[in-house]
Amino acid sequence: AYALPIHADEAKDKINEEKPPVSVKASNELVSSYLFRGFKLSEGPAVRSEAKIESHGFSLGAIAIYDAKQSVHNEVTTLADYTKTFPGDITATLGYAAILHPNSEQKRTQEIYAILGLNAVLNPSLSVFHDFDRGKGTYVELGIKQEVPIGNITPVFGFLVGYKSHYFRKESGFSHVDISVGIPLQAGKWFTITPHVGYQKGLGLGFEDAVHGGLRIEF
């Protein structure tokens, strides 16, 4: 997946922004294959749709993943969280997510998560997701993201490394690293179009190497 784990980039976007009392965001993303925390959850192209509503740090959202090759939804997630900004440009997010995988053996699961982000060089973030249902384990991800202006465009380079502690596995250890680059392009006042490409390297526990890419439209 592009640049940073699910939720982490959204948390960091809240740093030093003046927001209206209530805001609504939505996005659609076409990806070559759907990668979720190192797991490959589609055999071909997939569409990731997301919508969320925010107010005073609270956020409610929903995410749906449609497998275009199999013509089925591989994931439907609902989530709720709260983000607070602290002195030093530090953000902290606490949240809950209910995740459905209707075409897998797990079917459904639940997790709580915590995310720390820092608005500084490389914009580091640390995300911890604890699955207390079917997954019975913890996933930890460390990510960095940096904008690099080049002429009239500003590519965003990302890197992350994932660690799983008995997360849908008996074993524990580092699962994968991922490098990526995306180029956000403003299309009018309301839309941002971001083509992106990346590479996932499996580090063990049966995780695959994968080249991935896609196109994200936000509004």
Image (cartoon, grey):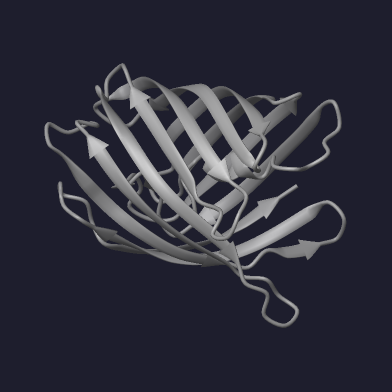
- Total numbered labels: 0
Residue at image coords 38%, 55%: 44
Residue at image coords 87%, 55%: 189
Q: Residue furthest bottom?
A: 151
**196 left or right of 207 in image:** right
Residue toward you, 20 or 114: 114
Q: Residue furthest front?
A: 88
Which quadrant would residue 126 be assigned to in this image? top left
Q: Residue furthest top?
A: 133
Which quadrant would residue 81 be assigned to in this image? top right
Picture coordinates of residue 8 (x, y %)? 53, 41
Picture coordinates of residue 23 (x, y %)? 79, 32
Residue at image coords 49%, 28%: 77
Q: Is residue 82 visible?
A: yes
Using the image, determine if residue 13 lies above or below residue 133: below
Q: Is residue 73 visible?
A: no
Picture coordinates of residue 117 (x, y %)? 55, 42
Residue toward you, 20 or 207: 20
Residue toward you, 201 or 103: 201
Using the image, determine if residue 28 lies above or below residue 194: above
Residue at image coords 43%, 38%: 127
Which quadrant would residue 37 be assigned to in this image? top left
Picture coordinates of residue 109 (x, y %)? 35, 21
